[in-house]
Image: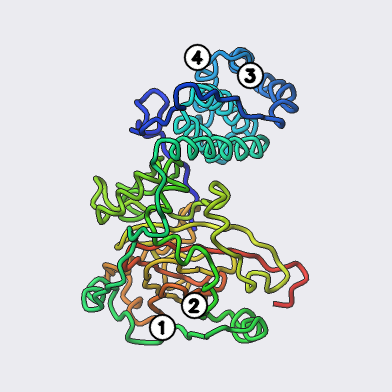
Amino acid sequence: MKHFFISTDTSLNSHSPPLKMSTTTAPCGDSVSTFQTPTLDTESHELLHSISEHGGYAYVSMAAMAAAGDFCAAEAAREMAWEQLHSGPWHSVLPVWRDAYSMACLHVAKHHYENGEFEKSLRVLDMGIIMGGTLLGKDLHYAVGKVSEKARSVRVSEGRCEDLENSENRLVDQEFDVSKVFQLLPVKSLTSKIVVKRSALSLEGFLKDHYLSGSPVIISDCMAHWPAKMKWNNIDYLQRVAGDRTVPVEVGKNYLCAEWKQELITFSEFLQRIRSNGCSPGGPTYLAQHPLFDQINELRRDILIPDYCFTGGGELRSLNAWFGPAGTVTPLHHDPHHNILAQVVGKKYIRLYSASFSEELFPYPDTMLCNSSQVDLDDIDERKFPKVQDLEFVDCILEEGEMLYIPPKWWHYVRSLTTSCSVSFWWSEGESSDA
């Protein structure tokens, strides 16, 4: 949908105070061994050599001291790499500096882990995963597993383990006021063509009736076996598996607004903002289009890739999470790949326009936003866009347990009607596909 880099807001700057987090420490007398970093051990010499070739002599000096256990040097190296990450547009950042940032994060996280500061260690590791390169990815994920396991054992020993089976702490209530919803939707919503809905649609039927013809469809009854269907509506479960993890979120009406920004916060703080009905300073907080399942393995195990995503002989391009309160809006835009949007918790309103209406929907001329429409469906400027109201569209309310297939280049607008958890699966056509 969009490609933005997290800003250098003071809340993200290494000079500013860290986000408020309770620090879990090891019980007295509980020795904590360090976690292993086999890739770093093997690749560090070559990586440091590459960093030197790109002028990072000071970083190399600090990294050497960090490897010997100097925490201050590790923090200094991380700050040097962070500055390089923010030296220009994200696409122009040299990959070696992203790997350098991952390396420094591993050194800093080791120090916190050895001191029993597990939540601090997790935050640093997540920063390495989110902002770092791919070279040390396995080490980062392995370390996250070790630190998370240790943090959980501490919670158990301190009697802070939740009884999830008996928990009624729900993320979304089942009550839904339809009359209020209609007041929030764009003009003419749910008055024209509704997206066709198919129950237990066969792969052959999907290929023939929707994939090849480029026709949207809602597929029901295909997510009943997902663990996420029950688990993700339990706040205590989400807190347990992801509460200490750091995630990037969007704050503001939507990404086309001037006041929109991105922040890095813990998932626990994100859940608190959702429970406050999105009334956080600056507007609603939305975890949007983030590869959360690459970051948090426990949540990845709660979902399954739909078989439909293998239609056309292509491959899965991205698997992203969309978590947010009622009222979050993704403006009218299109994406380059086949897309199945799976609604796990809550409800969403979705409007779709055919790819053939691209000219009439006035894409932004700016390269970064060329897949977004200048038309604000929530407040259409009829003087600038007099014919938009007459364009044909299909729409729907996507219910829990349903999947929506959105063909490539189809324009779509999305509004959360309740607190909502969704998963999008993008896949491409195979080179030999007849589609």
Q: Amino acid at mark 3?
A: Gly
Q: Secondary structure at mark 4?
A: helix
Considering every residue shown, the one lying at the far right of the view is: 432
Q: Is residue 166 left or right of residue 203?
A: left
Instruction: Tell me: 6 left or right of 211.
Output: left
Q: Which residue is mark 1?
A: 392
Give the residue type at disc 4. Answer: Cys
Tell us which disc is closer to us: 2 or 4.
4
Mark drawn on residue 72: 4
- Which label belongs to residue 354? 2
Residue 363 locus on image (x, y percent): 44, 63
At 52% from the left edge and 81% from the top edge, which residue is drawn?
A: 217
Do the numbered discs 4 and 1 sit on residues whose CB atoms are within 8 Å?
Answer: no
- The CA distance from mark 1 to mark 2 is 8 Å
State the SS at label 1: loop
Which residue is found at the position 63% from the left and 74% from the top? 308
Identity, as a three-letter code, of the amino acid under mark 2:
Ser
In this rendering, would 149 be left or right of 361?
right
Q: Earlier in the sequence, mark 3 or mark 2?
A: 3
Secondary-structure class at tag 3: loop
| For the residues bearing labels 1 and 2, Cβ distance under 8 angstroms | yes
Q: Compared with residue 183, is residue 12 higher up or lower down, i.e. above or below? A: above
Instruction: Tell me how far mark 4 sits from mark 1, CA to CA.
Output: 61 Å
